[in-house]
Amino acid sequence: MLTRSAPYEKSAIWRSQFVTYSNGANLTEIVGGGTLHHPNDPTTTTEMNTFHMDGPTIFKFAAQQVGPFLDRFFEPTRMGAE
């Protein structure tokens, strides 16, 4: 969340929160890379090194997570989600 500082105030980041939802990792992935499917390995296909995403499913998943995420974000602050 970003807001403009008043002219006499210093800029600051008051709070941040990062979360990883590993149970949705298969919905956005690059199968190739690393040692399992190295780009120089002849059995690695171009398709394995291409980013894939199930957009509609990711959107539904994110929509379910955003409410609880924001509740946890605002809980320790004096600010409300409003």
Image (cartoon, rainbow, N blue to C red):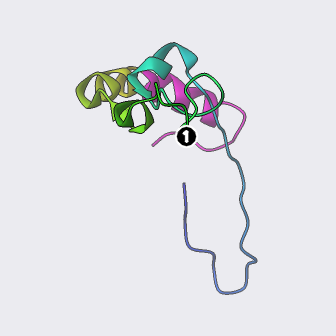
* Image location (x, y in percent) of residue 10: 76, 77
37 left or right of 34 in image: left
Q: Eyeballing the image, is 39 above or below 28?
A: below
The residue under the point 71% across, 59% down is 13
14 left or right of 3 in image: right
How crowded is the residue under tag 1: few (<14 C-alpha within 10 Å), some, or many (20+)?
few
Look at label 1 and name its amino acid: Gly
Q: Quadrant of the C terminus?
A: top left
The residue under the point 29% across, 21% down is 57
Q: Quadrant of the N terminus?
A: bottom right
Q: Residue furthest front?
A: 42
Q: Which residue is mark 1?
A: 80
Q: Which of the 4 quarters of the picture holds residue 56?
A: top left
* Image location (x, y in percent) of residue 70: 53, 33
* Image location (x, y in percent) of residue 72: 62, 27
Q: Nearer the viewer, residue 47 or 81?
A: 47
Q: Residue furthest bottom?
A: 7
The residue under the point 66% across, 27% down is 35
The residue under the point 58% across, 32% down is 38
**Helix, strand or loop at mark 1:** loop
Q: Which of the 4 quarters of the picture holds residue 53?
A: top left
Q: Which of the 4 quarters of the picture holds residue 27?
A: top left
- For the record, the magenta segment spans 65-82
Q: Nearer the viewer, residue 70 or 33?
A: 33
